[in-house]
Amino acid sequence: MDNEFLPLATAAAREASRWLARSSAAQRDAGLLSMAEAMRAAEAEILAANATDIGSFTGSASLRDRLVLDPHRIAAMAQGLEDIAVLPDPLDRTLAEWTRPNGLRFRRIATPIGVIGMIYESRPNVGADAAGLCLKSGNAVILRGGSESFYSSIAIHAALISGLRAAGLPEACVQVAPSTDRAFVAAMLGAAGAIDLIIPRGGRSLVERVQREARVPVLAHAEGLNHTYVHAAADPEMARKILANAKMRRTSVCGATETLLIDREVAPTLLPLLIADLRALGCNFRADGASREIVPGLPPAADNDFDTEWLDAILSVRVVDGVDQALAHIARHGSGHTDAIVTEDADAAEIFLAGIDSAVALWNASTQFCDGAEFGFGAEIGIATGRVHARGPVGLEQLTTYRYVVLGDGQVRP
């Protein structure tokens, strides 16, 4: 790693963040639209860079799907930037205001965080989403993508810089690691005072390393060990439709369901249908003993299968006795990301929604709706599962903090 790059990058990012904090919404929106235009214009260069990454990739098919770019995905990145541009300005909002008996007027005002470090794996489009969200929210960002997507990330960054330049915005608003040297990650994690927030987005090992080593505050994106619980009062056709989508729409995304829990009361009739639906879509299974008694031939679940984020066409299956046992299973094995109940019983749904301790809980909907765009955020920089500052999809509002403005007319403290 060039030992001089990060200090220079963070210094430039700090200056850019100060410029952004004083900028108008119109300036930032113009930058987003210009970046989107540049992204479309650079399609050939981005595809060529992505082909280089794909040519040396040796991982699984589902992880390869995260890495692959095509004209549709490039257009989606550009559209994502445009979608962010039309969202309301998250800055300078008055979050609260009040007046004290002495006449002092207090205002709590939304303000940028400052300099954000984004460390991510596999999915090169994450860099474009992060750049767009950070720009709109007035933050400078330093990106470090995975080594498997290095050339794609460099090409996407070149397009983003071209757009910033055309719009007259500081190029240091969005920077990218110049190499795949792992020492750069360590340097980012140790950059207390130079980087204000680190956001890791990737597998468990990456997130755990960042949380273990960082001297900078971390907004963690945990793995998506998500559950769909089919309650005894579920509408069978709805359950079939939701589960097929939750598991198989895209198996490689963090919102995919990894475990099916189904009530014993309906399992004998409904579980064979659910298994047949998913088998037809190419899904494999890891099942507990009760499930295998109902559907002979299902592969048995090993001890750690219910603790595994498959990110593949594999589903863990368990039969449970009611809402309480479903909640207990999720509490023991879940990652606090996204969990869903399918039921027509409103009381059971309320018990589940109140008892689940996950960032996102759904009733009669696919877990794959855990996505910033689906929440109306335009895009997301990750899914936060901690309990400090933000939970769930992290969009513009979650990339701001606040400050206080106090207005007086000569008051002095007695």
Image (tube, grey):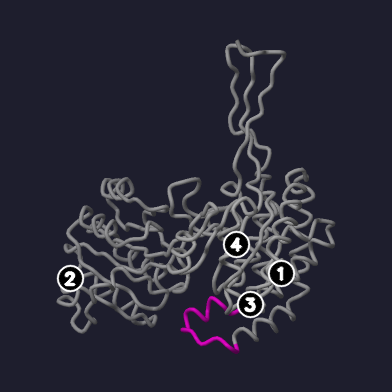
User: Mark 2 sits on what residue?
Assistant: 268
Residue 32 image offset from top left, x and y in percent: 74, 58
Q: Residue 267 carries which label?
A: none
Q: Give the crowd class for mark 2: few <14, some 14-19, many >=20 residues within 10 Å.
A: some
Rendered residue at 63%/33% (across/down): 94
Q: Give the crowd class for mark 3: few <14, some 14-19, many >=20 residues within 10 Å.
A: many
Dot 2 or dot 3: first in sequence order is 3
Distance in Å between CA atoms under marks 2 and 3:
49 Å
Q: Given the current orientation, which residue lies at the most extreme bottom position?
A: 55
Q: Residue 150 carries which label?
A: 3
Distance in Å between CA atoms under marks 2 and 4:
53 Å
Q: Residue 188 carries which label?
A: 4
Q: Which amino acid does label 1 sit on?
A: His
Q: What residue type is labelled 4?
A: Met
Dot 2 or dot 1: first in sequence order is 1
Q: Quadrant of residue 44?
A: bottom right
For the residues bearing labels 4 and 1, Cβ distance under 8 angstroms: no
Q: What residue type is labelled 2?
A: Pro
Distance in Å between CA atoms under marks 4 and 1:
18 Å
Q: Nearer the viewer, residue 83 or 24?
A: 24
Q: What stretch is highlighted in magenta?
A: 55-69
